Amino acid sequence: MRLSVVIPAHNEQDVIESTVRSFHERLAADRIPHELLIVNDNSSDATESILQRMAAGMRELRYINNRPPHGFGFAVRAGLEAYTGDAVAIVMADASDRPDDLVRFYRELLRSGAGCVFGTRFARESRVYAYPAFKLFLNRLANYFIRIVFGIRYNDVTNAFKLYRRETIDGLRPFLSHHFNLTVELPLKAIVRGYSYVVIPNDWINRSAGVSKLRIKEMGSRYLFIVLYCFIEKWLSKGDYRRLTGPSQGRVADGSEPADAKDPDATTVSP
């Protein structure tokens, strides 16, 4: 199975080379066939020139320029239109996601046969480094709200680091989100539309260089919009989007938080 890694990048000259090389070296060491697809999102620094230089010497790397309108969601959507693999992972350019975790995600996707692998930064085995306290509070509040609304046990829907099979991504179209709320739209649609998923722990490291592109004040209403959209689809579509063959039900792959077998949306695949 060929793996595509989509990395949106806006003004990431300080970290983009080290991020790309770390993922390439780790995937190559495990002999995982892959492409690294960087979406240059209107960078005004040296990000594109760095990518040009790297692409000349790394056949697994290619980059595209995101056409207007710009923004995180549009950049990821451009990557999801252009990737060529059998599965696709969305990875942040700021080195907050670990290559070792991506290898674990890939192995779990193959082993389980699930449609998606979702990470959680809030399992016993997870390690989170330097998460800003206020953002952490808002994160846990938002995820608690989503869990209550959808009746699910998955506790890190807002985590951008996820892996999807191609047929899953194709089944989630069309995409609506323009910004970071795309990280919520994709997993909620996958759950609502009946795609099976596995949840495993992943680590998260706050960026040490560059500037975060997430603007909390701008995102609240956008996150709420997409949550409500998926909620309406769940309850008013009468199952029109659900797959004909239901997903397996079971427990979180690491065993840290079992899914509720009585809950039709507890669609984590049993390991």
Image (cartoon, helix red, strand yellow):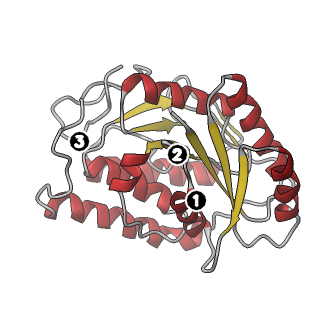
Looking at the picture, which amino acid does disc 1 mark?
Gly
Looking at the picture, which amino acid does disc 2 mark?
Val
Relative placement, left or right, of 129 versus 242 is: right
As helix, strand or loop, the secondary structure at mark 2 comes to strand
Circles 2 and 3 in contact, beta carbons < 8 Å: no
Q: Position of residue 256 (x, y in %)?
A: 42, 22
- x 72%, y 37%: residue: 23
Task: Look at mark 1 in the image and give the residue it sits on.
Answer: 79
Task: Look at mark 3 in the image and give the residue it sits on.
Answer: 265
Q: Position of residue 239 (x, y in %)?
A: 14, 55
Circles 2 and 1 in contact, beta carbons < 8 Å: yes
Outermost residue, left direction? 238
For marks 3 and 1, give the CA distance.
28 Å
Q: Quadrant of residue 186?
A: bottom left
- x 53%, y 45%: residue: 85
Nearer the observer: mark 2 or 3; the answer is: 2
Circle 2 residues within 10 Å: few <14, some 14–19, many ≥20: many
Task: Look at mark 2 in the image and give the residue it sits on.
Answer: 88
Q: Position of residue 140 (x, y in %)?
A: 48, 47
For marks 2 and 1, give the CA distance.
9 Å
Say if 254 sits above or below 24 in the image: above
